[in-house]
Amino acid sequence: MRIEGAAVAGIGMVRFDRYPDRSGAHLARDAGLLALRDAGITLAEVDEAFVGYIQPAAMIGIKAMKELGLTGLPVTHIENASATGLVAFREAAWAVASGRAEVAMAIAFDKMTDMARNAPSRGTGRDQLDSTILPAAYFALWAQRRMHDHGTRPEHFAAIAAKNWNHGALNPLSHRRPDHTVTVEEVLASQLVAEPLTAMMACPADDGAACAIVASTDWVRRHQPDRRVVRPVASALQSEAYSPGHTFLGPVVGPATMTRTTALQAYEEAGLGPDDMDLALCHDAFANEELEYYELLGFCGEGEGERLLDAGDTALGGRIPFNTDGGLIARGHPGGPTGLAMVHEVVTQLRGEAGDRQVHGARRGLAHLVGGGSVCTVNLFETD
Amino acid sequence: MRIEGAAVAGIGMVRFDRYPDRSGAHLARDAGLLALRDAGITLAEVDEAFVGYIQPAAMIGIKAMKELGLTGLPVTHIENASATGLVAFREAAWAVASGRAEVAMAIAFDKMTDMARNAPSRGTGRDQLDSTILPAAYFALWAQRRMHDHGTRPEHFAAIAAKNWNHGALNPLSHRRPDHTVTVEEVLASQLVAEPLTAMMACPADDGAACAIVASTDWVRRHQPDRRVVRPVASALQSEAYSPGHTFLGPVVGPATMTRTTALQAYEEAGLGPDDMDLALCHDAFANEELEYYELLGFCGEGEGERLLDAGDTALGGRIPFNTDGGLIARGHPGGPTGLAMVHEVVTQLRGEAGDRQVHGARRGLAHLVGGGSVCTVNLFETD
Amino acid sequence: MARVAIEEGYFTVPDDPAEAPRLLGSRCGACGEHFFPRRQVCARCLHDGCDDVELGPTGRLWTWTYVHVPLFAKKNAKVSAYGVGQVDLPEGPRVQALLVGGPDDFEIGMEMVLDLETLRTDDDGNDVVIMRFSPHRAAGAHEGGERP
Amino acid sequence: MARVAIEEGYFTVPDDPAEAPRLLGSRCGACGEHFFPRRQVCARCLHDGCDDVELGPTGRLWTWTYVHVPLFAKKNAKVSAYGVGQVDLPEGPRVQALLVGGPDDFEIGMEMVLDLETLRTDDDGNDVVIMRFSPHRAAGAHEGGERP
Ligand SMILES: [Zn+2]
Ligand SMILES: [Zn+2]
């Protein structure tokens, strides 16, 4: 169902990085204050909040919200693995679209560095039946199969990673901002993590927070008459549908094809298609994923991703630039906040405020994430 | 805002108890199958699911849902401390009311026995700055102050506990089903936990799962023509509003007065008042809470709770029976599922299917929970 | 031999053990409301800009309890009973904390004073301390008594 | 001296160490689809009533990788590299598991066979075992070869 009558009123994020001395609640507060300021309001004007985090904990969402104020607003913790931020945004957009809130906040924070440090010490990667496959290995399995099926070479994955590192250099809010042009050779020469993926093809472990405020379109037009209004028009969320070859045991994010059915649903709900998009953000926790999503999001046919990449179509300046902010690989992927960083980038682009990385004339954007378990979400935004 | 056009299509729960040999995912599956059977459908007919649990974990909600099938439906984890189950229900009701789903599921599971066993061993109750106040102590602070302000005696708290134990004896789905009439003396003679609260005034630690399926009222009338249709009409959710005397540090569920403002909002949204209610379920994790909520939910004036209790008005057969299923104290309080057990009881009562504990002619019911952090939710249901 | 707080940023640890510690709180630069613990955004008026202040060390007991089963519902309890309470500081904040004393030592409205308890010694030989409140022997215990 | 599974309900532990273990799976009573691990409700047709069956022990390698940094992004790695893969059982299920061998030992489409690795000894002196797949030396490794 198309989302009607909701628009983004404010965005804010704390640059993803390692913050050993700052609590998650304080990172959330700072992102929330930036978004409130961007919207021109205080928490008193917010009718409902959805707080996203992945870290295994209860009740800390509302504790984080208290750092922004105690206004009595409804607060609900939303979690959907790596898709958490976009799903919190979806809830906020629907709270507004359904009329139960005039202004709703989606806010997320996580400290991956804490989670890595506090992970069970027995997690040696091979002494638990249900944990033998780490995310890097899991996506490496995709990469190996793709190389087998389509003749894809590690150079293709490296080219995507290099592109996203170099996009990150143009984004002041990117975790990784290389001081030189990252090359395919450099990516390939970095530590081999799991055949054929290297460390520079993977997202970093970082901390961060991000926030987006959604309001009724009327509210946004009234309060922000001089700004281009960016509206979420579709938010499709799917879990895994059964198909032969489904794996049940071990960390999974579902078959790659989840992205195809979820994108189809989003396009249908919005009455739009891939050709209408001016930029796309996708779950590039590992570079080879982006190649799959070129096809699964409908930007080229099956097995044509490499050609799209080689033509430069998915780089800034190309036909459909992917991960203009650096993606998970450069901008970072703390967990819950990742999806809201995507909203931050799409809104910045559609407002025309993306500076050196501006996609000229961008009017429509897509944000996609997959999450362990497994879920997939595809969100479409447009401006007038 | 009043919830329009949503009705409960199915309910199911696994009796709360200790289940050392059953996983949370399997408990959830069993509750879900019962609710699906009660609704007369399979998972294929469900458009969206909200999974509630409190236990500190990510991604297990969707893994639990997979035990019911892999249909691709959107699945989102909702957490709001002890209020989790009702908040998952609220999301399901709004998914239907907003039109984005025709049929939505709220399902929750938790294993408190695991959480107690796995709690950090350093949790001695006094060697962490932010954890010095256990829930029993926190609510004992309320009880002590009430005794000071209103001359309430431990006998009052014991009378509420005894009532709820005895209600539990009439409920096949209650964890505690005493084989004799529990007396005030018996409750007072049990282990003193925190002045003035005794062990029998407190809920048990247990495991369980519960599920409720919401569908459009049209759908329910069409598919269940011979059954009384129970509709959620309001679901108010609030976090703590600042007031003098607010405590920020240590586990808190917010000032008791949160319940007053949340109830007022729910009544206003539904166009109903306390006099319209035929039964109420409230957060009686500790018996003294229920006494406070008599007043805060509007069933009597401030300081009049003891009189309401002494008159038997809040027992089965009285004017406004509270916790007809035994409440948290007897029926149990595994965490996430608790709110959905409340939905189970309200729906069973309003359908007229509560057997020995049936509130005669019950047409409207209230379900209330508070959650750490702090939040409060008040939900109103009615039938024709 | 030095004393260090169990967690930084909540209370002072005076060099002189005879000196009472103080709570580290905030005061809103706009409306003047006080908070404990520290916060940046005022919970009352939402002003972004609270100033650091020290609060206490005395206050009045709003409510208390005495915990006889410290790890209620957890089976491996090996700690003794203890008191907990909420203390209203003269500046406004209500503070939940451990109390020193037995169940017969507390009365609502009585004057309390902050002190520090040594929990253990850390690897550097420092005493790790936590804050708590004790009945203020010098002050009147009856409700409504004037604040010092 | 006995061997016990790291977790019950996933694979058999034959008394004879030379005998290959089998996977503990399910078969839908309605549509006949097979699953690993066991489940009650059919993931394909939603029928509530799957039957216990044993699956494998051989299968064909769908994809594989070799993990050089087992605790990637965690700093205290003290385990060696290892292979992981997905193996398609003749009955249908695709199983993710550890692989035995080095990075040069694997080829997509090759025949694999389930075996058990001893991880440690438990307090009762039993060997705790985990399942894994090895290249099936006796079988052809080329894709499209017939299943045994
Ligand atoms: Zn202020
Ligand atoms: Zn079947």
Image (cartoon, coloured by chain):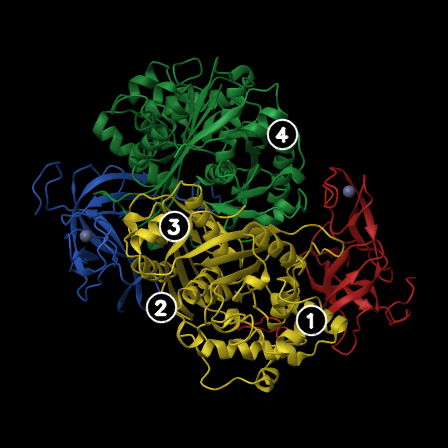
Chain colours: A green, B yellow, C red, D blue
Q: Residues within 10 Å of mark 4 (few under 14, many from 20)?
A: many
Q: CA distance from mark 1 to mark 4?
A: 46 Å
Mark closer to the observer (3, 4): 3
Ligand 1 image-quadrant field: top right
- The chain ID associated with circle 1 is B
Q: Give the answer, above or below, for where B135 lies relative to A304.
A: below
Residue B304 numbered mark, or none: 1
Instruction: Provide the secondary structure element on which disc 3 rests.
Output: helix
Q: Quadrant of residue C101?
A: bottom right
In this orientation, which residue lies closer to the viewer: A114 or A245? A245
Q: Amino acid at mark 3?
A: Thr
Residue at the image point whose x is 14% and y is 53% from the top: D32
- The chain ID associated with circle 2 is B
Q: CA distance from mark 3 to mark 1?
A: 39 Å
Q: Quadrant of the N terminus of chain B?
A: top right
Residue linked to disc 2: B21
Marks 2 & 1 on one chain = yes
Q: Residues within 10 Å of mark 2 (few under 14, many from 20)?
A: few
Instruction: Provide the secondary structure element on which disc 2 rests.
Output: loop
In this orientation, which residue lies closer to the viewer: C15 or C63? C63
Residue B217 numbered mark, or none: 3
